[in-house]
Amino acid sequence: MRVVVQRVSQAYVTVADEVVGRIAAGLCIFAGFGPTDQNSNVAALAQKILDLRVFEDARAKMNQSLLDVKGEILAVSQFTLYGDLSRGHRPSFTGAASPDDAERLYNFFLDRLKASGVKVATGRFRAHMHVTLTNDGPVTFILEN
């Protein structure tokens, strides 16, 4: 599983000009899944995201988690995180999980995040989406397991 995590002051996603997910301050997560991903590594990465200390404390140090600041999550599936551009100019996606497996893992990932009590908004799996966000910092991390 690969994720891009961005600390945001707000974010939303639209599908066909309809807002399908919106959050205030928190994390915008773009999540991709590989063919060897299992529930166990997805659950571990979900927990790691919830525990990341990427929000500032009173001394302006990144020392607080999403749970500490009562932030929100916008989670968007993004198979292009597994795009391979090592040969030529057109990406290959053979390293990505099948759509059925990816959708199952994405839903499991969402369930793990929601189990923490955090508000989780989403995009729409396999839809053409427009994601609008205000990156706070900017703060962006890439995680993989």
Image (cartoon, rainbow, N blue to C red):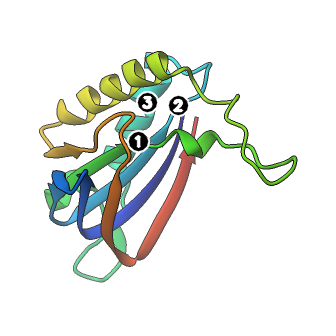
Quarter-wise, where is residue 8 in the image? bottom left
Q: What residue type is labelled 3?
A: Ala
Residue 113: give x, y in percent of width and height.
26, 36
Q: Distance between the residues labelled 2 and 3?
A: 14 Å
Residue 124: give x, y in percent of width and height.
28, 38
Q: Distance between the residues labelled 2 and 1?
A: 16 Å
Residue in the image at 54% along x and 34% along y: 1
- In the rendering, which numbered label is found on residue 33? 2
Q: Mark 1 points at which residue?
A: 48
Residue in the image at 26% along x and 51% along y: 74
SS type, badge 2: loop
Residue in the image at 37% along x and 70% along y: 62
- In the rendering, which numbered label is found on residue 44? 3
Q: In this view, does 13 lie to the left or right of 106?
A: left
Check whether the beta carbons of the residues at disc 3 and disc 1 lie within 8 A of each other: yes
Q: How far apart are marks 3 and 1 (CA)?
A: 6 Å
Q: How many marks?
A: 3
Task: Please indicate, yes or no, whether residue 7 appears anywhere in the rendered image.
Answer: yes
Quarter of the image containing the C terminus? top right
Q: Which amino acid does label 1 sit on?
A: Lys
Give the crowd class for mark 2: few <14, some 14-19, many >=20 residues within 10 Å: many
